[in-house]
Amino acid sequence: MKKALIKLHISVFLWGFTGVLGRTINLKEGWLVWWRTFITIVSMWILYAVLKKIEKISWKQFLVVGGIGVILALHWLCFYGSIKYSNVSIALTCLSSSGFVSAIFEPLFFKRKINPKEILIGILNIVGIFIIYFGNIHFSTGIFIGLTAMLFSVTASILNKKTIDKYNPETYTLYQLTGSFVGLCLMMPLYNYFFPTTNIFPQKLDWVWLFVLAWFCTILSFVLYMEALQHVSAFTSNIVLTLEPVYGIILAFFLYKENKELSHFFYIGLLCILLAVVLQTRIITRHSKESTILLE
């Protein structure tokens, strides 16, 4: 459990960095995600071919794993859209409400009783989101898009937890991201119709940041996340994911001075979210110790 949590935190830190890169790269959210996914899967297929790590799966299995990848692609589209309509801090913080949604929907998927403690911790996350929303109403569009990104994130997380045990993490990540790219290619004509743009190619340093986004914030982080997900619940992973805004916000404050764009209510809401993370971490640690005692 301890190693799994460490891997989970590393992956979340890398994901926190994606928000800053999303604001840095001069592309609309659709093309930003397309190029990110394109570079990622080309790199992974080449790397796995050289290492002879490519494992074949059936078309039926690909439709399942790749289908979850499409949901993931929708999450990315909404996440970067939230950044463009508000800022990095708002977009990342919206993802923190995943704890409450996961506490409700995960038991339905895995047929277990709803844990009252998980509900209370999730509600604390929601309180934080409401405080941030009403204190920064001028970012309402970005907040709604960010919450939609959260719903896609929770859905993908729960479905991943339901299917990951049947696959090697590297293989699972490869085919899921391939599914993301295929889904994006099918969606881009519709996206371009509603959000037309002539700037579809990365410019100058955009290439550097896209490769950082693909290699470190996608490939490395996803492998670590999938390995961790084999040992922790979807709810636990979503609670730890609430640290993503913390890492990203610190970077955004430092690089873009976003603290000047936010009201003091933002910090009150963020404190509620941090408290929820601390409480869940204590529950996980206590449960781990109790399990060790029983085994002894």
Image (tube, grey):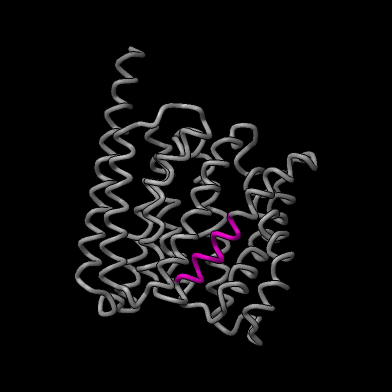
Q: Looking at this view, is 228 or 236 the one in front? A: 236
Compared with 147, 167 (above or below) is: above
- Quarter of the picture containing the N terminus is top left
Compared with 269, 22 (above or below) is: below
Q: Residue at x 49, y 39 (%)?
A: 229
Where is residue 45, by image quadrant? bottom right
Magenta stretch: give its range: 72-82
Q: Residue furthest right?
A: 59
Q: Looking at this view, is 5 or 262 the one in front? A: 262
Q: Residue at x 46, y 33 (%)?
A: 107
Compared with 158, 40 (above or below) is: below
Compared with 148, 155 (above or below) is: above
Q: Is residue 77 left or right of residue 254?
A: right
Q: Residue at x 44, y 60 (%)?
A: 147
Residue 170: image x %, image y %?
62, 44
Is residue 257 located in the magenta-colored stretch of the structure? no
